[in-house]
Image: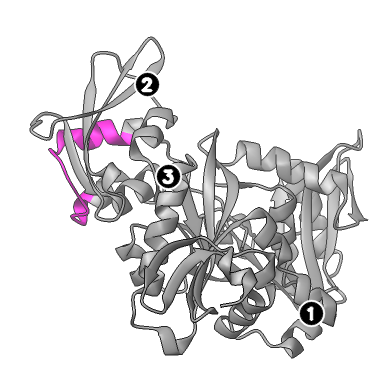
Amino acid sequence: MNEKSKSHTYIEVNGDFKMRELDKSDLEQFNALLQYAFQVTSYDLFQTGWKQEEIKYAKRPILEEAYVLGWFYKEKLASMIVVYSMKVNIHDEIMDMGGITGVATYPEYTGRGLIHSLMKHVINYMHEKEMSISFLYPYSIPFYRKMGWEIVSDKLSFAVKDTQLPKSRPVPGMVERVSLDSEDYHNVHSYFALQRHGALIRDSLAWDEYWRWDNEDMIAAVYYNKEHRPLGYVVYYIANEIFHIKEMVYLNIEANYGLWNYISAYFSMITQVQGDNYSGEPMAYLFEDSEITESITPYIMARVINVLDFLKYYPYQIQPEDFKIHFKVHDEIAIWNEGDYMVSWRDGETICEQVDNNQSINVVELNINTLTTMLMGYKRPTYLYDHEKLKTEYYMLTWLERLIPVEKPYFSDYF
């Protein structure tokens, strides 16, 4: 073992396998495993405009700003996981969120439970750091479900023929192309994220991740009203006569019309518009010619890390006085979550406390997965009851439907 290795503090040791936090000295091993696991070659990176030194140091901020944990076999990195410290809008309540990424293992070390143990450690880490919830983009939905995560948002991909583009609508403002680091563009997203359930509150690291693997042809265009206030944007590129939308956000219907006017102005240059919609609602109804192509895929999974805090600070739609509900939660991984949580309201304040498990009135029994997807609004209580995902008396469904906001999550980021 070299001198550098002696200074490392190991969290867990199992024979020649040792678990510890990664630092800047592990940058090359970190990049090598990341590129191997996600099958990203140097050629792929060059194709999106990266230079060799940029490739090497692109992920350095992670090792400086994120929590990166790995298993080492004889000082060689074998498996790792990354946790970003982020913030997310949960029904207008801004909560601390742990963003999971970089989950990877070399094939010769699979089958040893390395990722499973890393996941358990980072769940503990997020609990200690008081992160109420965690998000991740899944490489295996069944695996993450076993660890307590559940689907909470979808990506709806659409394709619109040039002949199906909406007719121009008169608007008082106009669209201007701006730089990708434009303050107006970033401000629109900030305003939007503070109003939209599920949206990520982007800091500098989140913006870096947003652009990480995009090519250099990306364009941002902002809609300004007649007072030159930015009210929406579309991020896109054009290739092979296709207008590719990465993201479109608008703060009011005027901006929506203005952005589609802008897109439709490319009619003579394109044959189709393709893009992704993260609202959870299909777009076809909004088009005069609704025979557009739309497909839906699960996108982001989430997991409540601390049930007591989440239920206490959750923004319920109503606050019924003289009513108590018991959430009987099962969580095999985060054992501190296992138990009965009594929620009640007094003088506009939510009261949540853990009580004994022999309650028999107003009980809703469910696992951490179902609790997460229900409170996030992805699936409604009645739907979950009908599919035997939760147990309760039928009359309680009316209360749950009234308590939980209806809005579905919007999450367009990738990390």
Say whether marks 3 and 1 touch (CB < 8 Å).
no
Give the secondary structure at mark 3.
Answer: helix
Give the residue pinned by disc 1: 48
Circle 2 or circle 3, nearest the eye: 3
Up-down: is 318 above or below 153?
A: above
Where is the C terminus found, in terms of image quarters? bottom right
Give the residue pinned by disc 2: 350
Circle 3 or circle 1, nearest the eye: 3
Where is the N terminus found, in terms of image quarters? bottom right
x, y percent for residue 345: 32, 18
The alpha-carbon separation of the residues under discs 2 and 3 comes to 21 Å
The alpha-carbon separation of the residues under discs 2 and 1 comes to 49 Å
Please tell me in which quadrant of the rendered image residue 49 appears. Answer: bottom right
Q: Three-letter amino acid code at disc 2?
A: Thr
Instruction: Please name the residue shown 40% across and 16% down the image.
Output: 349
Could you tell whether 193 is left or right of 10 in the image? right
**Numbered range of the magenta stretch:** 385-401
x, y percent for residue 282: 53, 59
Up-down: is 129 above or below 50?
A: above
Give the secondary structure at mark 2.
Answer: strand
Q: Three-letter amino acid code at disc 3?
A: His
Whether residue 146 is visible to the viewer of this picture, yes or no, is yes
Q: Is residue 280 magenta?
A: no
Give the secondary structure at mark 1.
Answer: loop
